[in-house]
Image: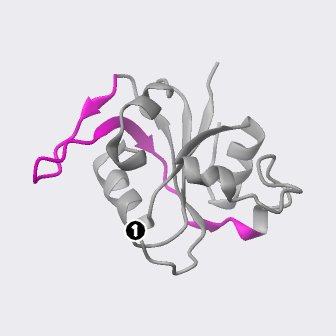
Amino acid sequence: MSAYWVAVASAEHVRIGRKDGFMQVNHGKAAPLRRIKPGDGIVYYSPSTVLGEKDGLQSFTALGTVRQGEVYEGVMGGGFTPARRDVDWVDAKEAPIKSLLDRLDFTAGKPNWGYQLRFGLFEISEHDFRLIGEAMGTKLA
């Protein structure tokens, strides 16, 4: 049985992971990534384009499936070795969350819908994963 997850990072960081086929969360921490298993669905939400900026992007920016393999250390330079998992990213366009707020299980009827995004990684329903995928223009099996 697969699980489905939302990870949170700036769009700039997500684009690096998409290009190189990996994901990382919570500033490179390994523990959250160990909750994710091969075959799980991942969607990234980006509150901003660049870390620390408040440009109001608030969009889903990547969607994919976790590949076989374990969490491993990546090399970013300067001694930074963030934990990563490999992901098969699908071709998807960015999709603003605002048009989905009343239809997603994790946001519908919740005035403080953004609170759980602060955790950096959380599980969502298959319904939400598919709805986000449709909004991003993907063809999910």
**Residue 131 magenta-highlighted:** no
Q: Secondary structure beneath disc 1?
A: loop
Question: Does 15 sit above or below residue 33?
Answer: below
**Which residue is located at x 40 percent, y 38 percent?**
87
The percent position of residue 61, horizontal first and vertical second, equals 52, 61
**Which residue is located at x 52 percent, y 81 percent?**
55
Question: Does 34 sit above or below residue 14?
Answer: above
Give the magenta range.
Answer: 70-98
**Residue 86 magenta-highlighted:** yes
Q: Residue furthest bottom?
A: 55
Amino acid type for the residue under numbered disc 1 = Leu
Question: Does 66 sit above or below residue 81?
Answer: above
Left or right: where 109 falls relative to 52: right
**Which residue is located at x 61 percent, y 53 percent?**
117
Left or right: where 129 falls relative to 41: right
Split into 4 quadrants, where in the image is the C terminus?
top right
Which residue is at the front of the view, 15 or 118?
118
Give the total of numbered labels: 1
Q: Residue furthest left?
A: 78
Split into 4 quadrants, where in the image is the N terminus?
top right
The percent position of residue 42, horizontal first and vertical second, equals 54, 41
Q: Residues within 10 Å of mark 1 (few under 14, many from 20)?
A: few
The percent position of residue 26, horizontal first and vertical second, equals 42, 46
Left or right: where 120 falls relative to 95: left
The quadrant in which residue 68 appears is top left
Q: Residue furthest top?
A: 1
Q: Which residue is mark 1?
A: 51
